[in-house]
Structures are given as C-alpha cells and as structure tokens.
Amino acid sequence: MSPRSASVNEAMRQRSRERLLQATVELVEERGYEATTLADITQRAGSARGLVSYYFSGKRALLQSAVHRLMHTELAAALDAEPPAVDGDEVLARAIDAILQLTQTHTRLMRTHMASILQEGFIQCPEQQRLAALLRGAVEAWGAADDAEEEYRLLRALLMGATVALLLPGAPMPVARLRAELFQRFDLKWSLGRPPSEEEADLPAVGTRLPADFPAL
C-alpha cells in the first residue's frame, strides 16, 4: 500500500481538529467548562489525547477556538441565507442578529467564552481570524471602506458588550433594546436582518434611541 499523500494527511488532520472543536461545544453546553475534561473531549471526538496538545495550547485555547468556529459557522449561514442580501445594510444587520441570536441559543457556552476572554484575552487561531474576516467584510459592505478596521473594532466591542448584557445573571438586558442601540449606531432599519418576534422582544426602556421603523409591540 502506497503512503498517503500530504494532502490526504492534512485533510485527515483537519477532520480530527473539527471533531475536537465540535465535541468541546457539545460537552461544555451539556456539563459546563469545569466539569468537562480533555479526556472527555477526546473520547467524544474519537481522537487521540495527543492531538489536543498538537493543535491547542490548553483547554481554554480549545474552548475559544471551538466557540469562534461556531460563531463563524452561524454568521456565515446568516449572511448566505435566502433571499440574498441586497445591500450592505442588510449584510451588517444579519451579522449583528446572528451574534445576538447565538448568544440566546447558546447561553452557557457564550457565558463561559466571555469569561475566558476576560481572563485570558483573545487567543489567535484560524477560527478567530475567519470570524474576524467575516465581520470586517460586513462592515466594508455596509460602507466603511476608508475606516473599515476602526469600524470593525467598534462593532466587535459593541457586540461583546451586548453579549455580556444578554448573559448577565439575574439582570439580563432585553434583546430588542440592545438590538435597537446597535441598529441606531449603524443607521440600520429595524426591519432588516432577523428582527426578534413579539414573543422574543421586550420594549426598550424610555429614553432609548430607536430606529424610525421600530414597531409598536
């Protein structure tokens, strides 16, 4: 039997890495971060323990890469959804909504992720870079070609702030209010993207600046 080519070996390594990332998401959501061990992750992924050390510097790096992969996947799906986005405002609206919705559907995972970032800072990895590229692209499509990097950094900071506000134990902010603030900052119509339904939304507090087409719920 002839030896496998370099491309085949690389594809196998990437599949192993993907399984580790997916297993991390599943287990942290099921059990929490502290109750999830690297042995649990490798067992769920069907991978050798040594692969974790090969790809990641530790458990926190594995977690951040796993969450960034999930965020990239969800964001890419939102941007590619039918019908196609017709302009840059729609692209940016979809990007904002994708992150807000992910925070609501993966609360435990995102709370753990934010705590990790605050403790350890951003860990550079391919998943984080792909996510950043998508967000920068959304900002550029919106119309910030001249200062796209600055607007991207602002968008990232605002999304992180909104994520923390949604996850705050005992005092979460309503998603509609946070969305209204973000849409107001980027001059986006409320009807763009995926607006929260009446069941999902709470009316923002008095004094919050609202987009002109914010519905009367």
Image (tube, rainbow, N blue to C red):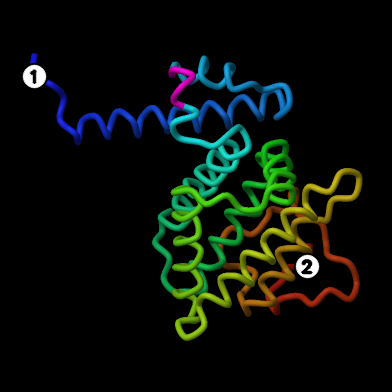
Q: What residue sits 39% from the left and 62% below the top?
A: 84
**Residue furthest bottom as drawn:** 146
Q: Looking at the picture, how far across and down is residue 17, in whole percent?
A: 42, 32
Q: Nearer the viewer, residue 158 or 55?
A: 55
The residue identified by callout 1 is 2
**For the residues marked 2 and 1, what is the alpha-carbon distance in whole angstroms?**
68 Å
Of the 4 image quadrants, the one containing the N terminus is top left
Q: Nearer the viewer, residue 190 or 161?
A: 161
Q: Looking at the picture, how far across and down is residue 132, in whole percent?
A: 50, 60
- When asked about the image quadrant of residue 40, the answer is top right
Q: Amino acid at mark 1?
A: Ser
Q: Looking at the picture, how far across and down is residue 146, in whole percent?
A: 47, 86
Label 2 sits on a secondary structure element that is loop
Label 1 sits on a secondary structure element that is loop
Q: What residue sits 20% from the left and 36% below the top?
A: 7
199 left or right of 86? right
Q: What residue sits 62% from the left and 77% below the top?
A: 186
The magenta-colored residue range is 47-51
How many numbered tags mark residues here? 2
Crowding around mark 1 (Cα neighbors within 10 Å: few <14, some 14 to 19, many 20+) is few
Foreground disc of the pair 2, 1: 1
Q: What residue sits 57% from the left and 42% below the top?
A: 67
Q: Is most of the magenta stretch helix, strand or loop?
A: loop
The residue identified by callout 2 is 216
Q: Amino acid at mark 2?
A: Ala
Mark 2 or 1 closer to N-term? 1
In the image, is residue 134 above or below residue 19?
Answer: below
